[in-house]
Image (tube, rainbow, N blue to C red):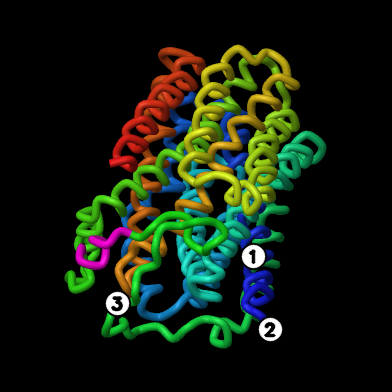
Amino acid sequence: MSDAAAIRPLIACAAALYTAVIGFRVTVALAAVHLGLSPASIGLVLATFALVPMLLAVRGGQLIDRVGVRRPMLVGAALCAVGALGCAALLHPAMLALSAGLVGVGMMGFHLGMQHAAGEIGGDTRRTANFNLLTMSFSVSGLLGPPMVGLIIDTAGYRQAFALSAALLGATWLAASRYPFERHLPRHGAEPAVAPEPPGPLEPPKATPLPPDADAAAAAVEAPRGASAAFSLLGAPRLRRLLLASLLASASWDVYQFVLPLHAGSIGLSASSVGLSIAAFSAGSLSVRLMLPRLLAHMHPARWMQAALAVCVLAYAAAPFAGTLGTLVALSFLIGIGPGIAQPLLMAALHAASPPGRAGEAAGLRMTLLSAMQLLVPVGFGLAAGLLGTAPLFWLYAGTAAAIGIVLARAERR
């Protein structure tokens, strides 16, 4: 089996799991509204997705560097299924929070393993293509999950939507358990004695979109292996910029996924309409990812990311004025373009810029930072929504993203 074919079954598993998890998250948010929770309480429930990953993601990445991806991915899929089943059995605010925590931990294990596999299968020549496929699975899941659960909620109920997510997660576990990991992935547990020769800057269509930082290998290749040692990776300026840019791109989805149901509820849209609007975000991401190889052949990746960020910021600023489903769907599509371009390029660059033998650890550090943001966004934005309404939240992200984007662009030019 070729390297290109070897990654496809895992991508299919990832798409199925992400579809179920995104559907689960949307159902949790809508169920919390249905149960009469305040915006602040909804924020606390959603924050439990990120609490344990924030604390354990670095350890999880280090574990993957040592033992490989199979066990973390299978245990992760199983935990996600158990969490979804809990809500299908009992629809209660406490169960929503507990199940969200279980699904968050499971998603951490599966995603860290999947990201590591995408970086390793096929080596340097396949890395960007693999990460593009992986991020397309994010988009496909976002396209399918929210409308799927929205329709089930409107026609059958919340518990049935949770049960559907659990069934899909169980099927994912079964499919992933049959994948021949040992055949397609290198052995783990031993770090290379000599760091590989770093590739040069990307000139499309080479594999890595951005040059790895020469100081990344020196930043931590002999650092102690404790969880706190992972933060020594932040000593590499380029790795630090890549992590900050990755946070910015991911925040676009996290903020929107939280604020959109609140805004949609304020203008009287149904659960199906919320699902359709979130799906439009993923459609924007997917459409641009399908065109990514051609786009990279005509302009440097950094330029595309800057243009996509500008479109995303403008659409975010306009979103509070969307009073109809059609307008909200159109703006959601435009907002999805930003992370659609940025995420595959940044994930491939982060893997390439990591010190030898510590790619999983770098991915764990990224997830720790993302989880911290995912913990703070629902809580902070939930409190702010109760005081200010939803419009200032859209503008807050737009202004922050624009400011950080300008700073990163100037640092990259230097």
User: Hey, which quadrant is residue 299 in on the image?
Assistant: top right
Q: Amino acid at mark 1?
A: Ile
Look at the picture and state if 10 lies above or below 96. Answer: below
Report if residue 82 is visible in the image.
no
For marks 3 and 2, the one nearer the N-term is 2
Q: Position of residue 303 (x, y in %)?
A: 49, 39
Q: Position of residue 194 (x, y in %)?
A: 27, 82
- Whether residue 316 appears in magenta in the rendering, the answer is no
Residue name at image x 18 percent, y 70 percent: 223
Q: Is residue 5 left or right of residue 251?
A: right
- Find disc 1 in the rendering and name its residue: 11
Q: Amino acid at mark 2?
A: Met
Q: Position of residue 306 (x, y in %)?
A: 47, 35
Report if residue 53 is visible in the image.
yes
Q: Is residue 256 left or right of residue 11?
A: left
For marks 1 and 3, the one nearer the N-term is 1
Structural distance between the alpha carbons of marks 2 and 1:
15 Å
Structural distance between the alpha carbons of marks 3 and 2:
28 Å
Residue name at image x 56 percent, y 67 percent: 78
- Find disc 2 in the rendering and name its residue: 1
**Magenta extent:** 213-219
Q: Is residue 303 left or right of residue 19?
A: left
Label of residue 195 in the image: 3
